[in-house]
Image (cartoon, rainbow, N blue to C red):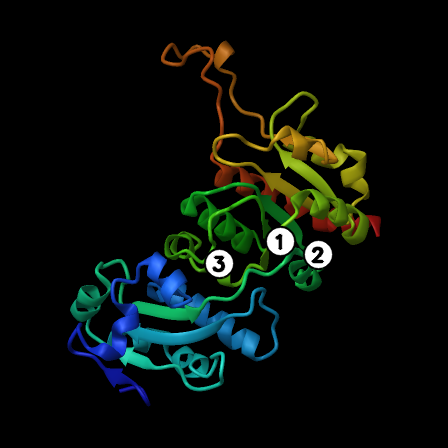
Amino acid sequence: MFEGATCITDSTDPRVVQFRSVRDGDLRGRDQLFCAESPRVVRRFLHTLVASHRGAVATPALSLSALLVTPAAAEALGELLGQSRACTSDGTLAPLFLAESSVMSQLAGYKMHKGALALGVRPESPSFDALLATLPLHQHLLIPTGVVHPDNIGAIFRNAGSFGNAGVLLADGCSDPLNRKAIRISSGRVFSVAWGESRDIAGDLGRLRSEFGFAVVAAEESDGSVEIENLFAVPAVTRARRIAVILGSEGHGVCATIRAQCDATCVIAMGDSTKSDNRLLEPSDHPSLNVAVASALFLHRLRGARSHSSAES
C-alpha cells in the first residue's frame, strides 16, 4: 500500500468523480483539467512535473490534480508517484487513488487507460514571448498553422520530442495539444516539448527573424521551392542561427500570404504520377505527405543545423 493512497472499489465513489467518463469537453470547460493515460504517458508527465519542480524549465508550467492507478501500475511508477504528488498548484499533496483495472474501466468508460490515469491542471497557453523566452538557443521551431486533427498535433509533438531539437508554436486555430487524444498520440512528449500559441502569426514571423535570429521556411511545394536536401544552400538559411518551419493545414497547406513572408519554400521530393507506370494512378493524382510525417522529415534534416551553426559561429 502506498503511503496516503485511497483504495477505490466502487466506480460510483464520489471521491473519484473527476475521473468519470473523462470527456475532453468536461475536462476543459467544467474542470479546467487535462488527462494523461497509460503508464508510459503518465510516467512522462510525472517526470516532467518532478524535473520542473527541481528547477528545469517547462513551457507551459504544469501541475498535478489527482492520480488513479492500478496496484500494478503504481509499482511500475515507483518513486515518481511519491515525488510528483507535491507538484500541485497550491503545494498540497495530490490525491492518489488505487483501483483494479475493471473498476477503472467502469469509471473512465473505456479500457485504453492500461491501468494509469493522471489529471493535470490546465495551464493557459503560453504566448509567443513566453515560449521564445524559455526556448533553448540550440532549438528550432515547428509552426503548425490551422492543423486541426488531434492525431496530427500529437504526432508533431511526438516527433519534436523524439528528435529533441525543436519547440512548437501553434498558429491559426490548431487543435489543443492537451486534448486527451493528442496527449496519447504524442506518447507524452507534449509535456517535455516547449510550446506556445501565436496570436499574430504575421507579426511573429517578422520578430523571429529580426529579434531571434531565425530563418523562416515554409514546408510547401510551389514555384521556386527548393528540395529539402538543398535547404542549407539557401543564403538566408545558411546565415541563420535557427530555423522555423511552417507546416500548413491538412486541406490547404501553407497559404500564399505566409509563404510571401518566408525566406524559402521547401519541398520534399516525391514520386511523379505523370511519369509513373502504375496504371492504378490517375495522372492528376498528386502525391502528398501527412503533415506529421513531413514534420519528422524536416526535423531529421534540421539535425545538421546544430553542427552547421556551430561551424559558422
Residue 226 location in percent, x, y? Answer: 68, 27
Is tag 2's residue or tag 1's residue first in the polypeptide sequence? 2
Q: Which dot marks residue 138?
A: 2
Residue 198 location in percent, x, y? Answer: 62, 51
Is tag 2's residue or tag 3's residue first in the polypeptide sequence? 2
- Residue flagged by tag 2: what amino acid is it? His
Q: Which dot marks residue 301?
A: none
Estimate the spatial distance between the alpha carbons at disc 2 and disc 1, rounded to whole Å.
7 Å
Estimate the spatial distance between the alpha carbons at disc 1 and disc 3, rounded to whole Å.
13 Å
Look at the numbered discs 2 and 1 and tell me whether their residues touch, using CB distance below 8 Å.
yes
**x 70%, y 56%: residue:** 138
| Residue position marked by numbered label 3 in the rendering | 189
Specify the quadrant that holds the N terminus.
Answer: bottom left
Q: Residues within 10 Å of mark 3 (few under 14, many from 20)?
A: many
Q: Quadrant of residue 67?
A: bottom left
Is tag 1's residue or tag 3's residue first in the polypeptide sequence? 1
Q: Residues within 10 Å of mark 1 (few under 14, many from 20)?
A: many
Say if 47 sits above or below 258 in the image.
below
Q: Is residue 152 left or right of residue 302?
A: left
Residue 255 location in percent, x, y? Answer: 61, 31
| Residue position marked by numbered label 1 in the rendering | 165
Which element carries disc 2, helix, strand or loop? Answer: loop
- Residue flagged by tag 1: what amino acid is it? Asn
Residue 186 location in percent, x, y? Answer: 44, 54
- Residue flagged by tag 3: what amino acid is it? Arg
**x 37%, y 79%: residue:** 78
**x 71%, y 51%: residue:** 306
Q: Is residue 295 left or right of residue 88?
A: right
